[in-house]
Image: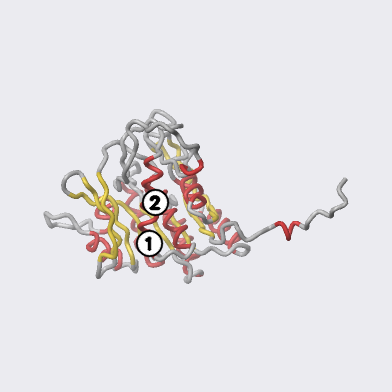
Amino acid sequence: MSATPSPKIEDAIGDDGPSACVMAFNANDPSGGAGTAADLTAIASVGAHALPVVTGAYVRDTTEIVDHFPFDDEAVTEQARVILEDVPAQVFKVGFVGTPENLSAIAEMASDYSDVPLVAYMPDLSWWEEDKIDLYQDACTELLLPQTTLLVGNHSTLSRWLLPDWESEKSPSARDIAKAANAFGVPYTLVTGIPLPDQFIDNVLASPTAVLCSEKFERFEAIFTGAGDTLSAALAALIASGTELNEAVTEALSYLDRCLENGFRPGMGHVLPDRLFWAQPESDDEEDGALSSVETDFEVPPNSTRH
């Protein structure tokens, strides 16, 4: 036995771990493509610590969502408030939380922590019953958006939700959507998947008065699951770490690009992002059909990868 005394555990704990924490409200996705799984891996991958609050569970495979079972609002509230008494969150990230009651509970909690920025992601809900979509999005508009710092979503999803009476033949711009979001209190909106000529799409960060930054990528046609949660979670983590908003958007899109480039197909359905691409061993051979660009409509071609 060594005569040298063991160091105390307090002395062994350094300051090299993540200093920023993101509280992520989302449903569990058993495919690992979206939901809480996407939040956890994306937040950790870009250098922050996730505080996951599970709001329910999807029933799904890698192709489609079959059903969703929500937690009640008390379960969601207790998860969040107990850990917040111990660990401070620098950012709240809200994905799909299942019910208007859960949206109300999260909005109430966010109002109690009004100094904490909130990143809200609105996914495509076309798998759900129409009456439930309407109730959920109405609650999000009335309750969550007034607490939201940055809204993230696909151009078509946000247009249908926030501008349902749009009559112009020209589709709404990112600023049009940002103005509609700002009417409910949202200062910044990141609109993804804006169609451009020649098979390109644009991603635009906008306020009601200006386009703050934009990133253009080539469109791909294969279906991709989980990119929206990946992007919004990475963005929340970068903001939590102190990155300025424009730079955070650019870095989050670049991170998503690498996740898609290394995407893989674990089942018979859609391609999933590899959010831990940097942890995989390097390959000397170039992959056929590599995913080289972000498709902000969240579609990428099939890919044979090192997985």
Q: Percent from the top left, x then y, of residue 85?
A: 61, 64
* Residue topped by disc 2: 231
Inspect the image, locate mark 1, and give the three-letter code of the amino acid beneath it. Glu
Residue 204 to residue 295: above or below: below
Q: Is residue 57 visible?
A: no
**Disc marking residue 247:** 1
Q: How is the image coloured?
A: secondary structure
Residue 168 place in picture, x, y as percent:
12, 57
Residue 255 image position (x, y, % from top left): 40, 50
Q: Residues within 10 Å of mark 1 (few under 14, many from 20)?
A: some
> Residue 27 or 261: which is nearer the viewer?
261
Q: Secondary structure at mark 1?
A: helix
Q: Are marks 2 and 1 in contact (CB under 8 Å)?
A: no
| Res. 5 in view | yes
Side (left or right) of 5 relative to 112: right
- Please state if 127 lies on the left or on the right of 93 as rendered: left
How many residues crowd around disc 2 within 10 Å: few (fewer than 14), some, or many (20 or more)? Answer: many
Q: Nearer the viewer, residue 115 or 251?
A: 251
Amino acid type at circle 2 is: Leu
Identify the residue at horizontal 37%, vertical 49% (top origin).
228
Query: Could you say whether the residue bearing mark 2 is in a helix, strand or loop?
Result: helix
Q: Nearer the viewer, mark 2 or mark 1?
A: 1
- Quadrant the N terminus occupies: top right
On residue 48, which mark appears? none
